[in-house]
Image (cartoon, coloured by chain):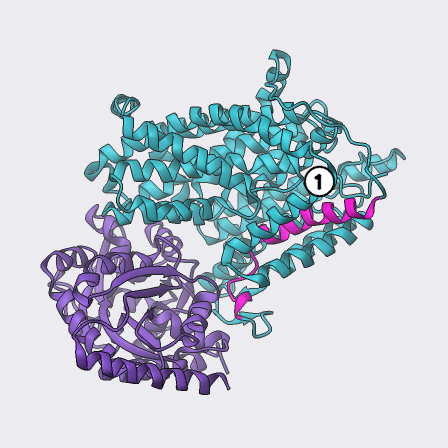
Chain colours: A cyan, B purple
C-alpha cells in the first residue's frame, strides 16, 4: 500500500511523464519494424540515457520495452510478419482477420488486450513482487527442462491436420536451435568454421523468413492482382458482447504471462504460444481458431504484454536479467550507478516508485499512441500490392541487417523464406518450427545441465517436484490431444482443420 | 597480399607517427575508437564508456566507443586486425577474445592483434548461499570429497569454469562443474541451493552480498582484496590456483612506438585520477596496469595456458 502511495506521487512528475511517453512511442515504432527486436530498440536509445537523470533514463528504457512488446503485433496482423518473437502467435488469427477486412478490429483487440495485459502485469509487479520472486528461485535446472517440454507439448495441438508433418516441422526448428555453441562444453556445433554462426541463429531471422519472406514469394508467384479485401483505416475496439467473450482468453494470457515473465529465460514467446493454445482448448468456439478468431489475438497479446511487466521482477529483486531486453535495462541501471537486487528497494526506493509510475503512464501512452499511429499503418498496407510488397521486402531486409550489421544474416533469412515457401506448398505448419526453434536451446541446456548435476541420473527429473508436476501436465496435454485425434478419426470425422494458414491458398 | 599491404601501411604510418611524435606531444590522431564486442550496457561496454570520459583529455584525443557485436568477439577482432595501426582504433580485451580465438578458430585471432596495455584485473571470488552449511572453502571441498560436489560457473567457455576445473584438480576431488548461460542463471542456482558454490566477479553479486544473501568463501586473486581483507585467497588455503581476469586494450599489429608510449603515459595517469579511481573502485575493479611489453607476454602466456586447459578438458583438439 505504501508503495502505491509513493509511486502515485510520481504520476505527475513531468520528467517521468515525458520519458514514459517518449519511450512507449519509440518502442511501438521499433517493435513494429520486423527484425528490430525490443532489445535493439532499447539499445539504440541507451547512449542517450547516459546523460539523463537516472529516473528518467530508467523509465524511458522500461517504457520502450513495454511499447516494443506491443508494437510487434502490428506487422503480425497487417503483413503476416511478427515484429517481435513474442508476436508470432498473433500472426495466426491476426493476419486472418486482416484478410477478411477486419484489420481495424484486429488491431483494436490487440491494443486493448495489450493495455489490459500491461496493467495486470504492472499490478502483479507492484503487489506480488516478493512472492513471485520466490517462484523464480524455486526453478532448478530440471524444472526448466520440464517447463520447456510443457511448451513443446503444444506442438501436438498446433500441428494442424497432419501430426507427422507437425513433428517434422518441429524437428526442423529444434535442429536449427542446435547450431552455435554447445551449452555445456562450450565447443562449437554445426558452424562449419563460420564465426557468424558462433552465437547461433537468432529466431527472429527464421521467423521473418518463414512468415514474411514466404508470403512475398507466394504473392509473387500468383498471377495478376489478387482480389483482396481492404480494411478501413480506423481502429475499432470490441463492443461489449465481444469484450465479454474476450475476458476469458485474456485472463488465461494474464496468468500464464505472469508466471512466464517471472522466470528468467522463459519469456514472452512461450507465454504467448501457451496462452494461445489454452485459449483454444477452453474456448466455446475452438473451430474459429486459425480462421480469424478474436480470442486468438486477445490471449497471446495479453500474455506478452504481461510478460513485459513481470519480467522486471527478477531484474529488480535479484539483479538478474531474464532476456536481452531486460539485460539492456540492467545496463541502464548500472550506468547510473544503481545496482538492482535485494538492496534496490532500500537504497534507491524512489527510482523503483518512479519506474512504477512511469510504467503506468506508459501503458496509457500506448493506448493513445496506438490509436494515433495505427490508422496510418492500415492506410499504408492498403496501397497497391506491388508497391506494398517492395516496401515490405525493403523493411525486412533492413530490419534483419540491423541486428548484427551483417549480410550473412540476410542470407539466413532468405534461405528460411525459401524453405518456408516449400513448406507452404507441401502444407507443413510453421508454428511447430517456431516453437522448436525458441525452446530447443532451453530444453537441451536444462536437460544436460540437470544430468551434470545428478551425475547422469535421470531420476533428478522425478525427484524435483516442480519438474515432476510439469512433466505430468505435459503428458496429459499430449495424451489429450492425441486422444481427441483418435476419437475424431474413429468417428470418421475430418479432424478439425486447424493450421495457421500455411497451406497454399486458392 | 593483405598482410603485406597492412605492413606497408603500418610502416608508413609508423614513420609519420615518428615525425609527428618528434614535433609535438600530441596524440597522432584526433579520434580514437574503442571497440567492444559486448552489447550496449554489457560489462565491457560500461567499462569503456566510463573510461572514455576520463581518458579523452589525458590522451589528447576524442575517445568514442563502438559496439561491434557478433561471433563473441570474432567480428571485432576481424574489424581491428584489418585496420591501420595508426593508434586510431583499439579493442577492449577480456579473456573472451582468447576463448573465441581458440574455440571457433575464426579467420582473425588474438594472435593477429597486438596487446597494448592492461588496465584492470576483475577479482573472481567463490561464493555460497548465506543459508548453506558451508562456512569455509574447506567445508565445500570436504563435501565434494565425501560425495559429489556441485559447483557452478557462468559460461561453458569461460575463465570461471577453468578456475573451478583447476581447483578440482588441485584438491583432487570429484565435483561436477555445472555451466550456465550467464551469471544470472548461476546466481539463482546458488541461492536456491542447487549448487554449493559459484564463481563470479564481485560486482555481479554486490547487491546480494550487501543484503547478506551470499557468503564469500575465497578469492582467486593473487593477494587479498582491499574490500574484503578477511577473505582468504585460494592459494593461501593450499590450492595453487590464481585467476586473472584482465581488462585491457589491443590494437592492430605493428603499433607505432609513440602511440604505445602515449598510452602507457595516459593509462597510468587516468588510473591515478581521483574521480575515476572512486568510480572504478566502487565497481570493484582492481587497477592492474601492465605496460606494453609485459602485457604482450601476459596475453601470450594466458593464451597458452587456456589452450592447454581446453585440450585437457577435450573441448578442442
Query: Looking at the figure, which quarter contains the C terminus of chain A?
Result: top right
Q: Is A214 one of the magenta-colored residues?
A: yes
Q: Residue at x 59, y 44 (%)?
A: A150
Q: Residues within 10 Å of mark 1 (few under 14, many from 20)?
A: many
Q: Residue B114 falls in which quadrant of the image?
A: bottom left
In which quadrant of the rendered view does residue A222 lie?
Answer: top right
Q: Main secondary structure of the magenta part?
A: helix
Q: Is residue B98 visible?
A: yes
Q: What is the count of numbered marks?
A: 1
The reply to whether residue A110 is in sight is no
Residue of label 1 = A157
What residue is at 43 percent from the left and 24 percent from the top? A364
Q: How far across and down, in percent of the image, does residue B288 sit?
A: 18, 71
Where is residue B160 shown, x and y percent of the image?
34, 68
Whole-percent x and y of residue B261?
A: 20, 79
What residue is drawn where x is 49% and y is 53%?
A142
In the figure, is residue A133 to the left or right of A273? left
Q: Does residue B213 appear left or right of residue A86 in this picture?
A: left
Along the line of sight, which residue is nearer the eye, A99 or B6?
A: B6
The reply, left or right, for residue A224 in relation to residue A412 is: right
Residue B220 falls left or right of residue B42: left
Chain where mark 1 sits = A
* Residue B2 x, y percent position in the rendering: 49, 83
Q: Is residue A404 above or below residue A261?
A: below
Q: Which of the pair B316/A292 is nearer the observer?
A: A292
Q: What element carries label 1?
A: helix
Q: What stretch is highlighted in magenta?
A: A195-222
The quadrant of the image that shows the N terminus of chain A is top left
- Asked whether residue B44 is drawn in magenta, I would say no
Amino acid at each position: 500500500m505504501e508503495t502505491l502511495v509513493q509511486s502515485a506521487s510520481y504520476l505527475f512528475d513531468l520528467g517521468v511523464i515525458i520519458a514514459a511517453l517518449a519511450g512507449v512511442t519509440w518502442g511501438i515504432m521499433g517493435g513494429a519494424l520486423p527484425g528490430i527486436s525490443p532489445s535493439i530498440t532499447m539499445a539504440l536509445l541507451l547512449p542517450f540515457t547516459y546523460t539523463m537523470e537516472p529516473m528518467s533514463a530508467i523509465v524511458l528504457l522500461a517504457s520502450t520495452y513495454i511499447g516494443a512488446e506491443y508494437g510487434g503485433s502490428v506487422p503480425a496482423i497487417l503483413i503476416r510478419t511478427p515484429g517481435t518473437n513474442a508476436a508470432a502467435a498473433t500472426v495466426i488469427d491476426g493476419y486472418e482477420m486482416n484478410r477478411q477486412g477486419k484489420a481495424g478490429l484486429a488491431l483494436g483487440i490487440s491494443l486493448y488486450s495489450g493495455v489490459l495485459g500491461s496493467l495486470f502485469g504492472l499490478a502483479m509487479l507492484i503487489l506480488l513482487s516478493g512472492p513471485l520472486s520466490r517462484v523464480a528461485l524455486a526453478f532448478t535446472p530440471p524444472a526448466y527442462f520440464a517447463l520447456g517440454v510443457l511448451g513443446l507439448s503444444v506442438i501436438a495441438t498446433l500441428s494442424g491436420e497432419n501430426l507427422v508433418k507437425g513433428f517434422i516441422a518441429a524437428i526442423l526448428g529444434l535442429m536449427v536451435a542446435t547450431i552455435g555453441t554447445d551449452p555445456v562444453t562450450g565447443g562449437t556445433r554445426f558452424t562449419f568454421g563460420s564465426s557468424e554462426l558462433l552465437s547461433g541463429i537468432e529466431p527472429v531471422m527464421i521467423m521473418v523468413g518463414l512468415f514474411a519472406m514466404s508470403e512475398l514469394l507466394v504473392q509473387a508467384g500468383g498471377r495478376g492482382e489478387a482480389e483482396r479485401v481492404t480494411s478501413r483505416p480506423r481502429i475499432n475496439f470490441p463492443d461489449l458482447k465481444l469484450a465479454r467473450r474476450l475476458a476469458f482468453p485474456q485472463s488465461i494470457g494474464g496468468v500464464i504471462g505472469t508466471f512466464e515473465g517471472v522466470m528468467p529465460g522463459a519469456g514472452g514467446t512461450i507465454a504467448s504460444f501457451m496462452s494461445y493454445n489454452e485459449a483454444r482448448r477452453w474456448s466455446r468456439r475452438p473451430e474459429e481458431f486459425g480462421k480469424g478468431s478474436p480470442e486468438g489475438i486477445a490471449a497471446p497479446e495479453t500474455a506478452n504484454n504481461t510478460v513485459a511487466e513481470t519480467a522486471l521482477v527478477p531484474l529488480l529483486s535479484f539483479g538478474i536479467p531474464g532476456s536481452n531486453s531486460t539485460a539492456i535495462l540492467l545496463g541502464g541501471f548500472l550506468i547510473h550507478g544503481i545496482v538492482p537486487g535485494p538492496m534496490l528497494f532500500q537504497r534507491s526506493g524512489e527510482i523503483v516508485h518512479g519506474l512504477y509510475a512511469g510504467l503506468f503512464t506508459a501503458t496509457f501512452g500506448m493506448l493513445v499512441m496506438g490509436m494515433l499511429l495505427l490508422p496510418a499503418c492500415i492506410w499504408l498496407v492498403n496501397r497497391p500490392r506491388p508497391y506494398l510488397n517492395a516496401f515490405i521486402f525493403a523493411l525486412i531486409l533492413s530490419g534483419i541487417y540491423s541486428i548484427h550489421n551483417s549480410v550473412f544474416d540476410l542470407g539466413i533469412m532468405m534461405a528460411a523464406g525459401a524453405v518456408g515457401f516449400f513448406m507452404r506448398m507441401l502444407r507443413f505448419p510453421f508454428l511447430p518450427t517456431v516453437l522448436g526453434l525458441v525452446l530447443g536451446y532451453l530444453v537441451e541446456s536444462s536437460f544436460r545441465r540437470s544430468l551434470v548435476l545428478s551425475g547422469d541420473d535421470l531420476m533428478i527429473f522425478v525427484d524435483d517436484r516442480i519438474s515432476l508436476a510439469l512433466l505430468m501436465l505435459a503428458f496429459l496435454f499430449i495424451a489429450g490431444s492425441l486422444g481427441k485425434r483418435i476419437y475424431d478419426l474413429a468417428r470418421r470425422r475430418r479432424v478439425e482443420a486447424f493450421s495457421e494458414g500455411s497451406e497454399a491458398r486458392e | 597480399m593483405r598482410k603485406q599491404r597492412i605492413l606497408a601501411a603500418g610502416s608508413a604510418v609508423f614513420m609519420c607517427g615518428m615525425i609527428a611524435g618528434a614535433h609535438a606531444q600530441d596524440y597522432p590522431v584526433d579520434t580514437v575508437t574503442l571497440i567492444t564486442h559486448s552489447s550496449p550496457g554489457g560489462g565491457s561496454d560500461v567499462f569503456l564508456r566510463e573510461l572514455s570520459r576520463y581518458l579523452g583529455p589525458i590522451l589528447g584525443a576524442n575517445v568514442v566507443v563502438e559496439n561491434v557485436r557478433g561471433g563473441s568477439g570474432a567480428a571485432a577482432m576481424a574489424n581491428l586486425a584489418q585496420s591501420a595501426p595508426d593508434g586510431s582504433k583499439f579493442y577492449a580485451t577480456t579473456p573472451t577474445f582468447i576463448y573465441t580465438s581458440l574455440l571457433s578458430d575464426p579467420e582473425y585471432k588474438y594472435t593477429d592483434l597486438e596487446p597494448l596495455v592492461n588496465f584492470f584485473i576483475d577479482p573472481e571470488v567463490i561464493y555460497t548461499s548465506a543459508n548453506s552449511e558451508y562456512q569455509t572453502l574447506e567445508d565445500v571441498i570436504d563435501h565434494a570429497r565425501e560425495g559429489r560436489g556441485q559447483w557452478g560457473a557462468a559460461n561453458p567457455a569461460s575463465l570461471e569454469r577453468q578456475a573451478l576445473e583447476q581447483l578440482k584438480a588441485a584438491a583432487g576431488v570429484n565435483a561436477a562443474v555445472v555451466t550456465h548461460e550467464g551469471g544470472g542463471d548461476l546466481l539463482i542456482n546458488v541461492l536456491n541451493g542447487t549448487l554449493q558454490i559459484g564463481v563470479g566477479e564481485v560486482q555481479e553479486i554486490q547487491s546480494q552480498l550487501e543484503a547478506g544473501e551470499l557468503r564469500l568463501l575465497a578469492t582467486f586473486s593473487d593477494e587479498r582484496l582491499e574490500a574484503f581483507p578477511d577473505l582468504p585467497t585460494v592459494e593461501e588455503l593450499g590450492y595453487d590456483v590464481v585467476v586473472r581476469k584482465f581488462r585491457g586494450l589491443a590494437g592492430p599489429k605493428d603499433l607505432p612506438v609513440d602511440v604505445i608510449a602515449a598510452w602507457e603515459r595516459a593509462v597510468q595517469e587516468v588510473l591515478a585520477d581521483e574521480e575515476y579511481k572512486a568510480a572504478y573502485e566502487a565497481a570493484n575493479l582492481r587497477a592492474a596496469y601492465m605496460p606494453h611489453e609485459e602485457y604482450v607476454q601476459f596475453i601470450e602466456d594466458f593464451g597458452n595456458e587456456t589452450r592447454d586447459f581446453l585440450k585437457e578438458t577435450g573441448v578442442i583438439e
